[in-house]
Image: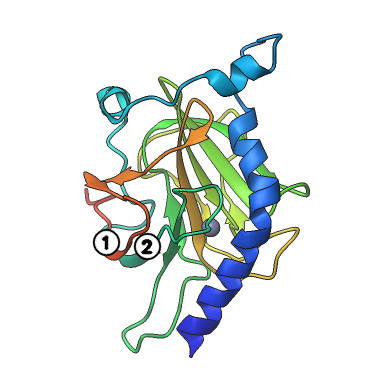
Amino acid sequence: MHRHYRRLLAAAGAAVAVTVAAPLAFAAPQNGAAGGEGDQAVAAASEAELAATRPAFKMPFLCGQQWLGSNWNGHSPAHSIDWNHYDSNGNPDDRGRRVFASAGGTVLESHYSTTTGYGNTVVIGHGNGWQTRYAHLKTRGVQKGDKVKVGARIGQVGATSAKYTLSPHLHYEQIHNGRTVVAVVQGVTWHDFTKRNQTSKNRCG
Ligand SMILES: [Zn+2]
């Protein structure tokens, strides 16, 4: 029952988030184009182009922890992954678990968003147009401008959102040139719409 309840909460949050989160994700790289239509005409990078520059992203959790990820249909932005953790009895115990950088880089955002559903959110820039976003955090442990290495602690899992009532989970995005793309985590491609367990290899020493 708990899982159904959680999923419904997440779905409700994301359904509304379509109108708020998606424009943010796609509005980033304007490049000063005057026409407006030119922005939308920028083609998404091909899988091969993405693979050529994509950092070796690790799961944003402690080494050995197994999390259930889902990039369910209707999630916004598309391709985002919601991560949940359960105890040995199958009960959710996400809240407060530590979140670590998927790859090294520079913190581009660390704030509580009052204009989106992201709540406490951190965005890390990794170079070559790549970013990762971590949302609904209970706490944030980094500030804009901080340099972080892969595995750096950046916050804790929570359920914060200015717009939605959520159950605790980590909302995670891999972004390329402002577009949230199909994530590749530890070499595993998260094609739409996947739900699977994955074990973190981050901070394994
Ligand atoms: Zn989400």
**Label 1 SS:** strand
Q: Amino acid at mark 2?
A: Gly
Gap in angstroms between the C-alphas marked 1 and 2: 7 Å
Q: Judge left or right: residue 107 versus residue 113.
A: left
Residue 143 image point, x, y percent: 61, 37
**Foreground pick, 72 / 135:** 72
Residue in view at x 38 percent, y 35 percent: 149
Residue 31 image point, x, y percent: 61, 13
Is residue 99 visible to the viewer in this orientation of the structure?
Answer: yes
Residue 75 image point, x, y percent: 52, 57
The quadrant where residue 90 appears: bottom left
Residues at marks 1 and 2 touching, judged by CB atoms closer than 8 Å: yes
Please name the residue that numbered disc 2 is placed on: 69
Q: Judge left or right: residue 25 versus residue 189.
A: right
Q: Residue furthest right?
A: 114
Residue 179 drawn above or below residue 115: above
Does label 1 or label 2 sit earlier along the sequence?
Answer: 2
Please name the residue that numbered disc 1 is placed on: 198
Give the numbered dot on residue 103: none
